[in-house]
């Protein structure tokens, strides 16, 4: 049985190191005393330059964290993922979203010794990935060329929503179809209602995106969309031009349920693709329709470049590893309970929401893979807003509040296609904020005092293109794997979410039967209040 992370020798050493070296660390002095600091604590990974030098750590901290990675058998755990082992142990599933962006000849991964030992079924899986990808891109192309379709409505939630939405938003400069994209996720009828109000059945393609094809919110939205379609001239008869067959596509691993729902056109994927890692699969169809097959492939290539870096670069020069270790350092040794995501890019306005699911659903766990209680905290709270908006909202607290919250700046070297002269101002603001957090302000009275020494990381992309975005998202996926591996948790299940789903279903049933036996007074009171007309 693997030792609990806090029992590992390196954990103890890191605690001592934090007490003796880092608690008193002053970033301003550290820069003055270490001419190599930027060089040592920054690196170029595929498509992403990372400046980690303004963090509350030193080269020694990193060395000790690398020792922790070694004692946690990080490399072996990573290689097990690459070998297709069932590392999602509670569901007995492999974790192979990275395979979705692996070229048929294994591309930059071909040299990996793990791949040399690949079982034949992995090669079969890779072939199936490419067959489905080709099928999806052909469908995307057909939809792009179909002038009659002006609106794409994606109905899905969680991983079947956030990934496609963040990417379609981010790559809006690359959308060249003249179609409108709508994402409906919430079961609140206002979201779907407002969309339905703006579209016409004969001009709309509905994508019902659900890995399981059982998620209550998605099923209710899909049923309502279908009913609206039929009520507004659509037909169940496949021979009709405005038919469900022509205007609905399901993206799912559960083709049988989609067929039962009445959708025949289905793109599939596999149970080894976790929902929150699924934008690279058939779930990415809205992205492929938006940016086209060539750019979709470019996004996969960017992600693959980051995969190859993660799976093959030495751990000390491996960006997902360095960031994942930094995350553990901040959460468990510095006791920072949240991380702020500050993308200085309008395109990345939904990145924080996307990362909330990716990181908090993956690593918000309290037991190890063996089911033992962990006595150290795991995933931090992920939150944020794009800059410069955040500067005029919560940055005050980041500068002068009493909590220390590491900030992750994400900026682009080149601006996009509109008003390029704004871009310099945008990026300079990001750099100035990172500087201000560190240098602070003194000597102008207590109210204006900013303590400084507040940590941040700075990720810089050349531009927001499909390849860079693919690499950035893959970087986050792997980084989360790394911290999960150090904590020795299963980053790929989500039983907490399942509990909420189960109880909501039970409450619906109890409402019908009015059987409140065994239900707590508060829940019962709220449910009964709902039923009262004189609320
Ligand atoms: O939020 C919980 C979850 O299970 C996610 O993991 C998943 O992305 C989402 O629900 C939607 O699930 P599905 O794609 O099966 O509808």
Image (cartoon, rainbow, N blue to C red):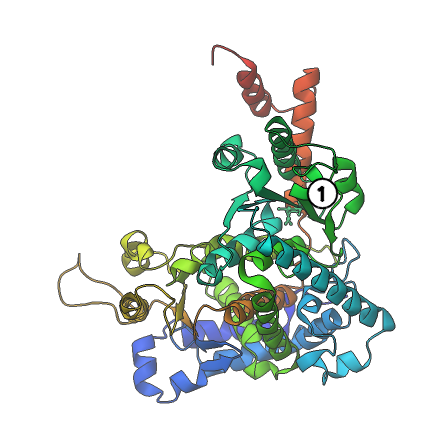
Residue 249's spot in the image, x, y percent?
A: 68, 46
Residue indicated by mark 1: 213
Is the C-beta of the residue carrying label 1 under 8 Å from the nearest atom of ligand 1? Answer: yes
Which residue in the rendered view is the most extreme toward the right? 120
Quadrant containing the N terminus in the rendered view? bottom right
Q: In which quarter of the image is residue 133?
A: bottom right
Residue 383's spot in the image, x, y percent?
A: 44, 54
- Seen in the image, is 443 located left or right of residue 431? left
Residue at (72% x, 78% y) in the render: 106
Which residue in the rendered view is the most extreme toward the left? 444
Circle 1 SS class: loop
Q: Which of 191 and 432 is in front in this view?
A: 191
Which residue in the rendered view is the most extreme toward the top? 534
- Seen in the image, is 453 located left or right of residue 380? left
Location of residue 177 with respect to 73 vertically, above or below:
above
Residue at (81% x, 72% y) in the render: 123
Q: Which of 94 and 103 is in front in this view?
A: 103
Residue 351's spot in the image, x, y percent?
A: 47, 57
Residue at (65% x, 67% y) in the render: 485
Q: Nearer the viewer, residue 419 or 475?
A: 419
Residue 324's spot in the image, x, y percent?
A: 55, 69
Location of residue 385 with respect to 454 vertically, above or below:
above
Q: In which quarter of the image is residue 496?
A: top right
- Seen in the image, is 51 located left or right of residue 217? left
At label 1, counting other C-alpha atoms closer than 10 Å, the crowd grade (few under 14, some 14-19, many 20 or more) is many
Any part of residue 380 in sight: no
Any part of residue 454 in sight: yes
Q: Quadrant of residue 377?
A: bottom right
Location of residue 92 with respect to 516 vertically, above or below:
below
């Amino acid at each position: 049985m693997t030792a609990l992370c806090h029992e590992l020798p390196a954990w103890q050493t890191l605690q001592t190191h934090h007490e003796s070296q880092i608690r008193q660390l002053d970033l301003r002095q550290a820069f003055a005393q270490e001419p190599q600091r930027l060089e040592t604590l920054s690196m170029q990974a595929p498509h992403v330059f990372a400046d980690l030098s303004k963090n509350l750590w030193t080269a020694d901290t990193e060395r000790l964290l690398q020792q922790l990675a070694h004692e946690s058998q990080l490399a072996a755990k990573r290689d097990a993922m690459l070998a297709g082992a069932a590392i999602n142990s509670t569901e007995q599933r492999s974790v192979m979203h990275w395979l979705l962006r692996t070229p048929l000849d294994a591309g930059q991964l071909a040299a990996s010794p793990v791949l040399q030992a690949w079982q034949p079924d992995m090669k079969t899986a890779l072939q199936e990935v490419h067959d489905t990808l080709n099928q999806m891109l052909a469908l995307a192309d057909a939809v792009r060329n179909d002038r009659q379709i002006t609106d794409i409505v994606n109905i899905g939630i969680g991983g079947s929503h956030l990934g496609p939405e963040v990417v379609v938003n981010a790559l809006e400069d690359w959308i060249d179809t003249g179609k409108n994209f709508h994402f409906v996720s919430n079961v609140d009828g206002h979201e779907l209602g407002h969309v339905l109000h703006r579209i016409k059945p004969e001009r709309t393609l509905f994508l019902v995106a659900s890995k399981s094809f059982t998620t209550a919110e998605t099923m209710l939205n899909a049923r309502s969309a279908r009913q609206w379609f039929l009520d507004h001239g659509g037909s169940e008869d496949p021979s009709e031009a405005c038919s469900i067959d022509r205007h609905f596509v399901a993206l799912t691993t559960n083709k049988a349920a989609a067929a039962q729902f009445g959708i025949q056109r289905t793109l599939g994927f596999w149970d080894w693709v976790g929902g929150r890692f699924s934008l690279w699969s058939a779930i990415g169809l809205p992205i492929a329709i938006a940016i086209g097959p060539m750019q979709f492939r470019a996004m996969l290539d960017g992600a693959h470049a980051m995969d190859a870096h993660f799976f093959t670069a030495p751990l000390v020069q491996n960006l997902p590893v360095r960031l994942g270790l930094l995350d553990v350092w901040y959460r468990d040794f510095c006791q920072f309970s949240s991380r702020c995501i500050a993308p200085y890019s309008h395109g990345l306005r939904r990145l924080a929401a996307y990362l909330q699911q990716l990181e908090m659903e993956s690593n918000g766990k309290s037991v190890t893979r063996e089911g033992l209680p962990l006595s150290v905290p795991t995933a931090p709270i992920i939150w944020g807003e794009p800059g410069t908006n955040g500067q005029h909202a919560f940055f005050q607290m980041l500068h002068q509040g009493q909590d220390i919250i590491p900030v992750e700046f994400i900026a682009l070297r080149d601006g996009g296609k509109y008003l390029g002269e704004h871009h310099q101002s945008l990026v300079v603001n990001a750099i100035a904020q990172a500087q201000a957090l560190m240098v602070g302000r003194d000597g102008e009275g207590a109210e204006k005092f900013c303590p400084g020494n507040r940590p941040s990381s700075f990720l810089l992309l050349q531009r927001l293109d499909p390849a860079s975005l693919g690499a950035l998202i893959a970087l986050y996926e792997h980084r989360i794997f790394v911290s999960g591996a150090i904590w020795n948790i299963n980053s790929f299940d989500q039983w907490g979410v399942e509990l909420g789903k189960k109880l909501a279903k039970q409450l619906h049933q109890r409402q019908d039967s009015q059987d409140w036996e065994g239900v707590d007074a508060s829940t019962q009171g709220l449910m009964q209040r709902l039923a009262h007309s004189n609320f």
